[in-house]
């Protein structure tokens, strides 16, 4: 039987079997702890340039379907599973997982102990990885190739995944339009504007290159900053745009990458987490209500903001609204004098629990309150 190899940049090598497309691929090795939702993971633009290791051992039994895709393509650089399902058994399935990966040219590997790889990354931190399938290289050559590949820190990737042209997602039939939002696409998932539209928001999804003038031209009631890939420290143009919006006291809601950009716009640093948070079962504490929410995460960077008490910014006082219960990482920010808030996770939860869906309602309330004040 042919062999495939997963090679980490610390020299660790895991031997498995060829699966999905063959060849070689490189990226940042990350693990996702979700037992389901692999299709949403694969089509999430935030995973651009990342090789995803699924910790759960059995993947692929529900196949793939167009309705659950979060973007127009599979974005992961590689996919790693232990036991791919030998058959698809779901009435909504339109094709198998492996066929979809082959069609997209995504190199994969199966038959490796994904929980052992997860423990390795958890103990040693996220690192570069290569998958070599059907490639004749020595072990030393594979390790060298991995170490020559780019790191995630310092990577500017959002422009690769952002829409080229603006488009509009309208409220569904029977839902009245009451607000308009400019959503800056840094790697937005389809479920996000859909969640806003269901609440009566006309969502204008706009390219990463959009200027302040472009945004004001649609006369929005608020601005949304989406999730996306890469290092938030590289997003200088978008950070400058956010500061201009903050000066105007424009209502702003940011998630994931957008949260990190808001943090930097407020003057905080961001930093690379040892191995990040990825999956659909991450516990977050809402410091305002005291409630614990189970949330969907996909991030490798975090905002360095003080958790205790209020903090000061040039845009007024604010506070950390949420923290991760696993490691104390800042998961939410909110300003007291400016209508701005953000969370590090995914309230659209595709896939995932819906504990955080109230955040879209909070955005609506924030915009409606701001509109009344301006009147």
Image (spheres, helix red, strand yellow):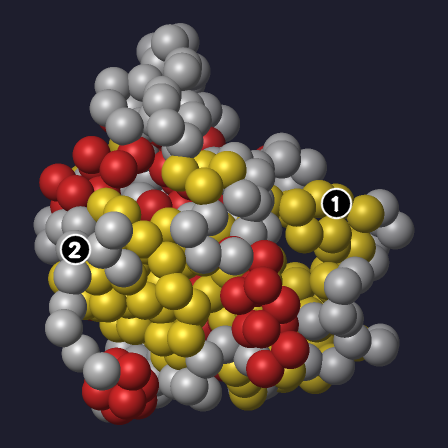
Task: Give the image quarter of residue 151.
Answer: bottom left
Q: Nearer the viewer, residue 171 or 135?
A: 135
Figure quadrant of residue 121: bottom right
Q: Residue at x 30, y 72 (%)?
A: 130
Q: Which residue is mark 2?
A: 22
Residue 356 place in picture, x, y as percent: 64, 41
Q: CA distance from mark 1 to mark 2?
A: 40 Å
Q: Nearer the viewer, residue 346 or 258?
A: 346
Residue drawn 36% across and 68% down?
6
Q: Give the side of residue 55 with respect to residue 179, left or right.
A: right
Residue 293, disc: 1
Q: Residue reaching furthest front?
A: 1
Horizontal arrangement in the rendering, residue 239 relative to residue 161 (left or right): right
Of label 1 and label 2, which has the lower sequence position?
A: 2
User: Is disc 1 placed on a helix, strand or loop?
Assistant: strand
Q: Is residue 165 left or right of residue 231?
A: left
């Amino acid at each position: 039987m042919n062999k495939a190899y997963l090679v980490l940049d610390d020299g660790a090598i895991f031997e498995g079997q060829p699966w999905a497309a063959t060849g070689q691929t490189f990226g940042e090795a990350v693990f996702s702890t979700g037992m389901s939702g692999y299709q949403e993971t694969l089509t999430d633009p935030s995973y651009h340039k990342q090789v995803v290791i699924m910790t759960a051992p059995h993947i692929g039994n529900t196949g793939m379907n167009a309705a659950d895709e979060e973007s127009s393509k599979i974005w992961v650089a590689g996919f790693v599973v232990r036991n791919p399902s030998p058959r698809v058994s779901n009435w909504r399935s339109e094709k198998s997982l492996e066929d979809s990966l082959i069609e997209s040219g995504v190199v994969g590997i199966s038959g490796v102990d994904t929980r052992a790889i997860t423990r390795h990354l958890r103990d040693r931190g996220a690192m570069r990885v290569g998958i070599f399938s059907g490639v004749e290289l020595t072990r030393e050559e594979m390790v060298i190739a991995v170490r020559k590949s780019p790191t995630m820190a310092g990577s500017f990737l959002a422009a690769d995944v952002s829409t080229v042209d603006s488009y509009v997602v309208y409220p569904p039939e029977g839902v009245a339009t009451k607000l308009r939002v400019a959503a800056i696409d840094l790697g937005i998932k389809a479920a996000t504007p859909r969640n806003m539209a269901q609440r009566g928001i006309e969502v204008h999804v706009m390219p990463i290159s959009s200027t302040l003038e472009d945004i004001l031209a649609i006369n929005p009631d608020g601005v949304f900053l989406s999730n996306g890939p890469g290092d938030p420290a590289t997003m200088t143009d978008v950070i400058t745009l956010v500061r201009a919006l903050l000066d105007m006291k424009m209502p702003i809601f940011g998630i994931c990458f957008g949260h990190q950009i808001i943090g930097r716009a407020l003057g905080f640093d961001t930093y690379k987490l040892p191995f990040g948070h990825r999956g659909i079962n991450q516990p977050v504490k809402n410091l305002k209500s005291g409630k614990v929410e189970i949330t969907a995460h996909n991030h490798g960077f975090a905002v360095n903001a003080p958790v205790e008490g209020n903090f000061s910014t040039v845009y007024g006082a604010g506070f950390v609204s949420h923290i991760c219960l696993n490691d104390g990482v800042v998961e939410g920010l909110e300003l007291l004098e400016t209508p701005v808030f953000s969370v590090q996770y995914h309230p659209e939860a595709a896939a995932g629990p819906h504990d955080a869906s109230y955040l879209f309602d909070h955005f609506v309330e924030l915009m409606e309150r701001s509109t009344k004040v301006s009147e």
